[in-house]
Image (spheres, rainbow, N blue to C red):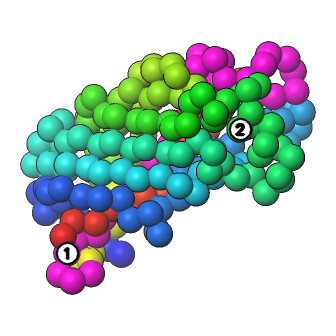
Amino acid sequence: MTTTTDLGELTGDYVLDTARTRIGFAARAALVIKVRGRFDAFEGSARLNGDDPAASVVRLVIRADSLRTGNRKRDDHLRGGDFLDVGSHPVITFTSTGVTPAGGTRFTVTGDLTVHGVTRPVGVDVRLTGVRPGPQGGFRAGFHGRATVHRKDWGVGPGGALVGDKVTLEFDVVVLRH
C-alpha cells in the first residue's frame, strides 16, 4: 500500500473488509503478563470526507462472544457474567461523534463506546496506513488505531489485583469503497 497526502480521494462510503481487519485488545493479568486477544466477528461502515474530516462518520459492531485469547477457559471466563456477560450484552458498539485532524495522516476519532450495556465517550488515535485501488475498480484504505480504556468505567470485571484496570484496544482496519 502507498500512503497518500491527498486526503480528498478518500471521500466516500465504505464497508469494513472483515477478512483483512483485526480488532484486538491487551490487558495485564496477574500484574506480570500482558494477555492479548481479538474479536473474530464484527462489521462496520464509514462515510469518510477527506476534504472535511470532521464530517466523517464511523460505526463498528462487534459480537462480544467472538472474543479469543488462545485459552478456552480464560475466553469462557471473559465472556461470562464476571466480565462481558455476552448472554445479556451480545454486542460491543462504537459510533463516532467527531473526527479531528492531528497532523498529516493522523486523526483523533471520538465516539460512543458501548460495552456491557454502558455507553461512554472514548478517543481513538488513528493513522492512515495506506491506500490503493480495490477489487473491481473500487478503492481500499487502511488505518491503525489505538485507545486505552479503563474496564471498570464500563462495569466490566471484578476488582482486585489480578486483572489490570487498563485495556488497550487496537484496530488494524481495511475499508472498501465500491
What residue is at 26 percent from the left and 31 percent from the top? 98
Residue 129, picture quadrant: bottom left
Q: Report x, y in % for residue 12.
A: 14, 57
The numbered disc on residue 79 is 2
Q: How far apart are the alpha carbons under marks 1 and 2?
A: 37 Å
Q: Amino acid at mark 2?
A: Arg
Q: Tag 2 or tag 1, which sits nearer the N-term? A: 2
Of the residues tagged 1 and 2, which is closer to the observer?
Answer: 2
In the rendered structure, which amino acid carries the disc numbered 1?
Gly
State the image quarter where residue 161 is shown: top right
Image position of 21 with respect to 62: above or below: below
Residue 6 is left or right of residue 100, and the answer is left
> Residue beneath label 1, please?
138
Q: Position of residue 121 (x, y in %)?
A: 42, 22
Q: Does residue 158 appear to the left or right of 92 in the view shown?
A: right
Residue at the extreme front: 87
In the depicted view, which residue is nearer to us: 67 or 153? 67
Q: Which residues are magenta?
A: 135-164
Q: In what quadrant of the picture does the N terminus appear?
A: bottom left
Residue sitting at x 53%, y 45%: 63
* 147 shown above or below 15: above
| Residue 166 in sight in this render | no
The x, y position of residue 178, in whole percent, is: 18, 70
- Is residue 158 inside the magenta stretch? yes
Q: Residues within 10 Å of mark 1 (few under 14, many from 20)?
A: few
- SS at badge 2: helix
